[in-house]
Amino acid sequence: MSNYSKSQSIREGIWSLIVGLKITAKNFLKPTITVHYPRETVPTDKLEGYRGHIELVPKPKDPFTPKCIMCNLCATVCPSGCIKLVTVKEPIEEKSKSGTNTQEDKKTAKKKFKKKLVAFELNYNYCSLCGLCVQNCSVKSLRFSKDIYLAGYSKEEFEYDLLARLRAKAKVKSAKELPQKNSEG
Amino acid sequence: MISLAQIPIPLIKIVVGLLGILIFIGLNGLACVYLERKVAGHIQRRPGPFEVGPHGILQPIADAVKLVAKQMITPKGADPILYWSAPIISFAPAIVCFLPLPFGPSLQNISINIGLIMVLAFSSLNVLALCLGGWSSQNKWSLLGAARDIAQSVAYEIPLLLSMLPIVLLTGSLNLADITAYQGAWPWQWLVVKQPLAFIIFFVCIFAETNRAPFDLPEAESELTAGFHTEYAGMGFGLFFLAEYSYMVVGCALATILFLGGYQGPVAPGWWWFLIKVYGLLMVMIWVRWSFPRVRFDQLLNLTWKWFTPLILINILITALVVKLI
């Protein structure tokens, strides 16, 4: 190493120390960014990047039913195996409703079934929040929730039924919106 | 029965002084813990201790109560005599170090003409305590911490001692009160203006002396859990902790006396100026701790032996020549 480059590296080293001190001094004078948790909570609009447990996305027009098509891809891809879809097969009874019970109608009614989502079970205890289910959902029916202050006393409290959760949330939301609409009308 | 008049006055002076020093060390420990944690918090954009008392001001007291109440455990296989003498050896010399420091014009416990040497001699005893504690713990982390501490003392002691020589050459005294009196009230009359290099080297060596980041190699919590005091619980650890903060104050007080004019100030000289300067330097030490990463061992040795020692020797030579010629 030549003398020139050596002296230059020393100068750079000393300058880097001053830069480091400057950075900490600047941050020292800035306001704090953490919140005093039990008294303050983070407002939901500041949780953009937060990844809570997954939740179901409702259909745009019907907040009570999820977009989910019950393809079971999320349950298959989950490395921890914490997703379980409970479905039932319901016969389609559109024709029988019309009142004309012909022989042909009965045959088709027996053949046609529709899958119905009864429960979307998530065992959050084993979830590692890898996000594979969210990435792989073919109809974008899964997303990360913003539930940040989760705490419980037992494991069972973290076994969720996401469908029931979606419906409960939609109910609360509609209950809130209805009186507003009434007052507007 | 001995009447009060029979007790010699110097003895009363020393007892009162020692009591004052112990109170100062205790309060200083509390203040420093709070200051350190608050500064660390705000540098990292968080509030620091906040729950105990308004703005967490009572947190150090809660910590102290916890430390005192904790059980003192001697690890299996440890040498109990060495193990328990180490924290005492670490803490006791710290008290002596405060004796010759002139806090104010008339606030000096004992005025002796070798004050500087006395402070240096007793502050280097800390190395022995750390060595004993690390060795007797029967724990590899502690032992590594102790070994590092010895090696570190070899690195920093010589430039630390040499960096004070120019001041002694200029003032012609080892009495700390005389050194303070040599300097004037205004900042340009302080010795830091005449000896800026010595001041920087002295201050950096103080970091190594007090085992503070970036030279906290004997503790190195990310590598050695807690280094030499890994096994200590309760007040064993508490004494090491108090000693560390006391040595920080001693170091900053020496820097203040030697380079920053001691208790002298532009308006109304007194102990308040001394404390303002000491705690200003302490703030810088805390600031540096939360800014820089820990250096590697060879980097510390390179810095002290390849840079500081030659530089300070040249500095001494020039100072000696100037003193002799003028």
Image (spheres, coloured by chain):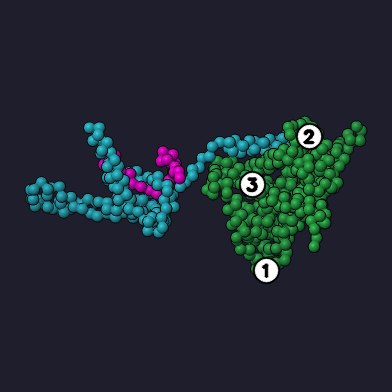
Chain colours: A cyan, B green
User: Which callout, 2 or 1, points at the residue further toward the start of the chain?
Assistant: 1
Mark 2 or mark 3, whichever is nearer to me: 3
| Coordinates of residue B6 in the picture (x, y in percent) | 82, 56
Estimate the spatial distance between the alpha carbons at disc 2 and disc 1, rounded to whole Å. 53 Å
Chain letter belonging to callout 1 = B
Q: Nearer the viewer, mark 1 or mark 3?
A: 3
Q: Mark 2, chain letter? A: B
Mark 3, residue position: B31
Image location of residue A181, percent across then percent down: 25, 35
Left or right: A55 as drawn, with respect to B201:
left
Q: Which comes sooner in the sequence, label 2 or label 3?
A: 3
Report if residue B42 is visible in the image.
yes
Viewer-closest of A112 and B222: B222
Write down the region rendered in magenta. Answer: A39-62
- CA separation in Å, label 2 and label 3: 28 Å
Q: Is residue A183 left or right of residue B292?
A: left
User: What amino acid does circle 2 point to?
Assistant: Trp
* Mark sitting earlier along the chain (1/3): 3
Q: Residues within 10 Å of mark 3 (few under 14, many from 20)?
A: some
Point 80% across, 33% down: residue? B184
Give the residue at x 68% y 64%: B138
Q: Nearer the viewer, residue B308 or B110?
A: B110
Label 3 lies in what chain?
Answer: B
Disc 1 secondary structure class: loop
The residue indicated by pointer 1 is B77
Residue behind mark 2? B190
Q: Are both tags, 1 and 3, on one chain?
A: yes
Q: What secondary structure characterizes most of the magenta part?
A: loop
